Amino acid sequence: MFSKEKKTIKIRAIIEVMGRPPEFLTETLSKTAEHLEKEEGMKVLKKEIAEPKETEEKNLFSSFMEMELTLKDMEKLTDFMMNYLPSNIEVIEPSEISFPINEANAFINNLLEKIHKMDSLTKKTGFENMILKNQLQTLFANSIKVEENKEEQPKVEKKESIEEAVGLEEEKPKKEKKAKKK
């Protein structure tokens, strides 16, 4: 992305996670670091994972990883920001970044494209969530109606057998009486 000066960008970044159990947080941060080490155009120089600590919310833990990385260019920095969502980034080197206007435009448009993709996903997820809420409310309302109808129906005594339920039990005694008469 830098035309004449192809300098790498050295940053310090913090990636935070929250969840449970605490071992899962440490494992997740370790896997994130492993994945970053395999990324082309990125190099992990240092990493330090903090011990998970319990948050104010019961049974939830938080942890973070502080790391130093070098990135080959501004595009890789953008990729890192959008894909790993660090809570903080500090550019260590270079002290100044300059590049031609066409590269600045390419960088800005690349960033906008990624933001629009995330916005689209967010809107789609929100829409799907709204549909699911409506379906759940309808389902809940229908289940209440069914319960109300059950209460309104007259109570039917439980029959001892299938014959009693369909009314055949009453005919049996009549048949037996006829048989006794003969």
Image (tube, helix red, strand yellow):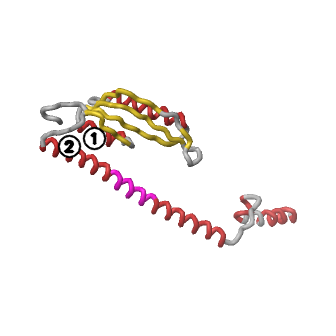
Instruction: Please name the amino acid that badge 2 sits on.
Output: Phe
- In the rendered structure, the answer to whether residue 1 lies left or right of residue 24 reads left
Mark 2 nearby-residue class (10 Å; few <14, some 14–19, many ≥20): some
Residues in magenta, as a range: 121-132
The N terminus - image quarter: top left
Marking on residue 78: 1
- In the rendered structure, the answer to whether residue 168 lies left or right of residue 33 reads right
Judged from this view, the residue extending furthest toward the right is 181
Quarter-wise, where is residue 44 in the image? top left
Residues at marks 2 and 1 touching, judged by CB atoms closer than 8 Å:
yes
The residue that appears at 26% across and 30% down in the rendered structure is 41
Instruction: Please name the amino acid that badge 1 sits on.
Output: Thr
The image position of residue 79, as x and y in percent, is 29, 39
Q: Of marks 2 and 1, which one's residue comes earlier in the chain?
A: 1
The residue that appears at 74% across and 63% down in the rendered structure is 158
- In the rendered structure, the answer to whether residue 49 lies left or right of residue 73 reads right
Eyeballing the image, is 159 above or below 23? below
Judged from this view, the residue extending furthest toward the front is 95
User: Label 2's element?
Assistant: helix
Q: Is residue 128 magenta?
A: yes
The residue that appears at 77% across and 59% down in the rendered structure is 160
The image position of residue 95, as x and y in percent, is 24, 36
Quarter-wise, where is residue 147 in the image? bottom right
**Circle 2 is placed at which residue position?**
107
Q: Main secondary structure of the magenta part?
A: helix
The image position of residue 15, as x and y in percent, is 41, 39
- In this orientation, which residue lies closer to the viewer: 175 or 7? 7
Q: CA distance from mark 2 to mark 1?
A: 9 Å
Mark 1 nearby-residue class (10 Å; few <14, some 14–19, many ≥20): some
Marking on residue 173: none
